[in-house]
Amino acid sequence: MSSIFLLFVFILSLPSVSSTQPLRGTLIDCGAVVDSIINGNKWIPDDKYIWGGTPKILMTAVTEPYLSTVRSFPNNLHQKFCYVVPVFRGGKYMVRTTYFYGGVNGRDSPPVFDQMVDGTFWSVVNTTDDYASGWSSYYEGVFLAQGKTMSVCIGSNTYTESDPFISALEFVLLGDSLYNSTDFGKYGLSLVARHSFGDNGTDILRYPGDPFDRFWEPLGDPATTHTVAGNKNVSVSGFWNLPPQKVFETALATRQAERMELIWPPVLLTFSRYYIALYFAENPDLSPEASRVFDVDINGVAYYKNLNVTSEGVAVLAKSWPLDGATKITFNPAAGSIRGPLINGGEIFKVLDLGGRTLTRDVIALEKLINSTQNTPPDWKGDPCLPRQYSWTGVTCSDGGPRIRVVSLNLTNMGLSGSLPPDISRLTALTGIWLGNNSLSGLIPDFSSLKRLETLHLEDNHFSGEIPSSLGNIQSLSELFLQNNNLTGQIPSNLTTKPGLNLKTSGNHLSSLPLS
């Protein structure tokens, strides 16, 4: 099966990773107004990273301090609100969003909405069942920082009945070896489940037990297995994914050399490709002469044959395994194996195809426009074009292809003020610009580099100075509306004589008669 990648990793003699170092990254307490220290790490307010939304304080008891506030966003269909966070370009980040509704919208049930990372649709956020049980909900993914910032966006979909919200947002820089069989230039990983098998407790294993604050939920004794003592001396530094030492202190196993079955993860999966990592280590207190060798199958398909589990530990990874619905993992003892199967931990992620990015020069030009004007739409953060159903208000983008371009701007009657930067001429794929009925002022920039421009509407603003003669050099231009501004001088002759041009200039201070 060409889409399956398996890796057999033995423990190596590498230096251990300290679990007491502070997390590297940014921990954001959404809706908060002051810094806080939680579990030895600094959490900061979100106001420097978000444009829009309303901070709110919950009036209900919470289990974690960062759940006591939220930021709520208007319920506008397919309008996204983005946190933009500085990162290290090329860094691999665990991104986690946390949601606890707390009745903030005045309704019994929380809203259902979408979340995105950069230009990629990440998932639908549905916290209904967790909230009914009194729990918060978290979503975790692994993504590559392709620029100096990353964005996480919240948006309303057709199922959203009240304002979307978010409680916490975390960006944690991961070690280079973690999940390194994934091509993060093409894919992201979205966590489905991560479990510490044989753990009969109720507490989630996290920082400082896990140096990256990944959540390992306990999964105790299913009916067909039993919990056994694990290995407290595994050197986890040899595992690429650096699972925490404590994961190997308990295990699920059979009492004899017999078949073991697990329905895992404990959710139904949608048809897709999944990254799977399973972790095993023998108890060193048992006799080394008694072998523990078994085969691992997933839904009847061989995952790994003759897996020999020793006290050094072993991990078996698949970077792209197709799954759909319920998943059954079967462990079959090999002939001659003295002991039965055993498993200590497991992680499974859905593999996400990245949605791409708007061409960088177009993004920079739009950022310059934001900086030179006031009252641009509140969703003008994150990727301008992607995901496609969440492109910025007034922005139309090209269809498909590796270079996503901005092809039109329509910000008519948006209450804009300020001036147009010369950088707007870098949007060289534009065919139409509609900026009429605003309060824009200053000089009209040089649009001559926009070779595809057909329509330019700047009417009913406060533009001043002369009409640039360079507009007459745009061969494709067929409609130019400049009426009701403060323009002076003469109308360039290459505009008055341009064949097929619909030109309107009335309501200015021009020295020649305006064309109606």
Image (spheres, rainbow, N blue to C red):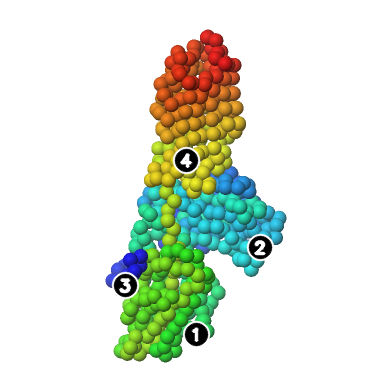
Marked residue nearer the N-terminal end (3 or 1): 3
Q: CA distance from mark 2 to mark 4?
A: 45 Å
SS at badge 3: strand
Residue 162 spot, x, y in % from top left: 66, 53
According to the image, label 3 marks what residue?
Answer: 8
According to the image, label 4 marks what residue?
Answer: 397
Mark 4 touches mark 1? (CB < 8 Å): no
**Quick check: 102 left or right of 270?**
right
Depicted 435 relative to depicted 123: above or below: above
Mark 3 touches mark 1? (CB < 8 Å): no
**Quick check: 509 left or right of 422?**
right
Residue 279 spot, x, y in % from top left: 39, 74
Q: CA distance from mark 1 to mark 2?
A: 38 Å
Q: CA distance from mark 3 to mark 1?
A: 27 Å
Q: Looking at the image, which residue is at 50% across and 39% down? A: 396
Mark 1 touches mark 2? (CB < 8 Å): no
Residue 436 spot, x, y in % from top left: 57, 27
Label at residue 61 = 2
Q: Quadrant of the C terminus?
A: top right
Judge by depth and name the residue closer to the eye, 399 or 380: 399
Q: CA distance from mark 4 to mark 3?
A: 45 Å
**Quick check: 486 left or right of 198?**
right
SS at badge 2: loop
The amino acid beneath tag 4 is: Cys
Marked residue nearer the N-terminal end (1 or 2): 2
Estimate how packed mark 1 is, as few (under 14), some (14 to 19) or many (20 or more) residues with alpha carbons within 10 Å: few
Label at residue 224 = 1
Marked residue nearer the N-terminal end (2 or 4): 2
